C-alpha cells in the first residue's frame, strides 16, 4: 500500500496530492442564521371573536356565502378562511362556520343544541359564521390620560380686605359684631368698612399680614 522501501521513493502514480507550506489558517465557517420562530396565529371566529365593535354587533350567523365570510376575515386583518382540517384541529365549537372548503361544525360530544351528532357535521343553515386564520392580535386600547388635579388660585386680597386692621381708640369699645357709622367690628376683633367683608378667620389673618407688610415697608424707608 505504501511501498516496500524505507526513505524517499519516487512516485509512479498518474495523479498526486499537493504538499503546501506558508498557508493561512482556514476562516471560521459562518454559522447559519437562527430562524425566527413563527408564532402560530390563533384562529378567529367571526363575529364573536372580532376586534371590531361593529362586527361584534352582527347576528350569530351573518354570512350567506363563502365569499362574504372570506371578505369579513380579510377586513378583520386575517389571511382569510382556514381549511376544514384547521377548523377540526381547533376542537369542538358549537357553531356552524364557513371554511375555505366546506361549511359546518365539528363536535366531540353529542349535544342536541349542537346538531345532535359527533364528528364533522355538514352545515344546513342559510347563513353561517366565518372561520378565519392568520389573524393579528387585537390592539390594546390606549388608556385615557390621567388629568392632573387643578387647584384654585389664591384670590388676591381686595382693597377693602387690606383695610382690615386691629380696632383702635373708640373702636375698641365697640362690641364684636356691631358697627358705627363707618366701621364694623368683626367677631375676630378686626375693624372693617363693610359687614359683608367680615370673614372672621380670613379677615383677621389678612389684616395681620397687611399690618406686617406696612411695618416692614416703613422700617425699610427709615433705613434707606
Image: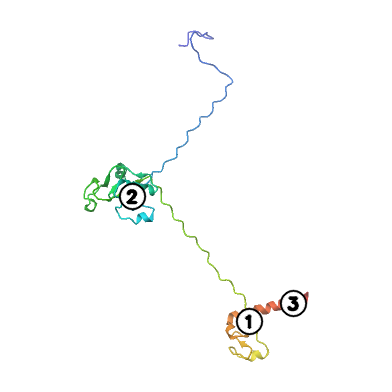
Q: Which mark is residue 45?
A: 2
Q: Which dot, 3 or 1, sits closer to the camera? A: 1
Please, what secondary structure does the residue beneath circle 2 have?
strand
Q: Is 44 in front, or is 118? A: 44
- The residues bearing labels 3 and 1 have C-alpha atoms spaced at a distance of 24 Å
Query: Residue drawn 65% across and 77% down?
Result: 209
- The residues bearing labels 1 and 2 have C-alpha atoms spaced at a distance of 73 Å
Residue 89 in the figure: left or right of residue 30: left
Q: How is the image coloured?
A: rainbow
Q: Is 95 in front, or is 190? A: 95
Mark with earlier residue (1, 2): 2
Q: Residues within 10 Å of mark 3 (few under 14, many from 20)?
A: few
Residue 73 screen position, x and y as percent: 36, 48
- Can you identify the residue that label 3 sits on? 219
Query: Residue drawn 63% across and 81% down?
Result: 160
Residue 137 screen position, x and y as percent: 41, 49
Please, what secondary structure does the residue beneath circle 1 have?
helix
Asked if the residue under mark 3 is in contact with the one under mark 2, i.e. CB atoms within 8 Å, the reply is no
Q: Which mark is residue 182?
A: none
Quadrant (top left, top right, bottom left, bottom right) of the C terminus = bottom right
Q: Is 138 in front, or is 208? A: 138
- The residues bearing labels 2 and 3 have C-alpha atoms spaced at a distance of 84 Å
Q: Which mark is residue 160?
A: 1
Q: Is residue 118 above or below residue 198?
A: above
Please, what secondary structure does the residue beneath circle 3 have?
helix
Residue 129 screen position, x and y as percent: 30, 50
Q: Is residue 60 above or below residue 180?
A: above
Q: Residues within 10 Å of mark 1 (few under 14, many from 20)?
A: few
Amino acid at each position: 500500500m505504501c511501498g516496500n522501501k524505507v526513505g524517499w521513493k519516487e512516485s509512479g502514480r498518474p495523479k498526486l496530492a499537493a504538499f503546501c507550506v506558508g498557508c493561512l489558517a482556514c476562516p471560521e465557517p459562518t454559522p447559519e442564521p437562527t430562524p425566527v420562530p413563527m408564532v402560530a396565529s390563533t384562529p378567529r371566529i367571526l363575529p364573536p371573536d372580532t376586534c371590531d365593535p361593529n362586527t361584534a354587533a352582527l347576528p350569530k350567523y351573518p354570512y350567506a356565502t363563502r365569499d362574504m365570510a372570506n371578505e369579513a376575515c380579510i377586513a378583520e386583518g386575517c389571511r382569510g378562511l382556514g381549511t376544514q382540517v384547521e377548523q377540526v384541529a381547533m376542537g369542538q365549537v358549537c357553531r356552524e362556520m364557513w371554511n375555505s372548503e366546506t361549511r359546518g361544525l365539528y363536535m366531540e360530544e353529542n349535544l342536541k343544541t349542537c346538531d345532535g351528532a359527533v364528528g364533522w357535521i355538514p352545515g344546513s343553515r342559510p347563513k353561517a359564521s366565518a372561520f378565519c386564520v392568520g389573524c393579528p392580535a387585537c390592539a390594546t386600547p390606549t388608556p385615557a390620560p390621567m388629568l392632573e388635579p387643578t387647584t384654585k388660585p389664591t384670590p388676591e386680597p381686595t382693597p377693602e380686605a387690606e383695610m382690615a386692621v386691629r380696632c383702635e381708640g373708640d373702636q375698641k369699645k365697640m362690641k364684636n359684631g356691631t358697627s358705627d357709622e363707618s366701621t364694623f367690628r368683626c367677631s375676630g376683633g378686626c375693624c372693617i368698612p363693610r359687614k359683608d367683608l367680615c370673614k372672621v378667620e380670613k379677615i383677621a389673618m389678612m389684616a395681620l399680614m397687611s399690618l406686617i407688610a406696612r411695618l416692614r415697608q416703613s422700617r425699610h424707608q427709615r433705613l434707606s
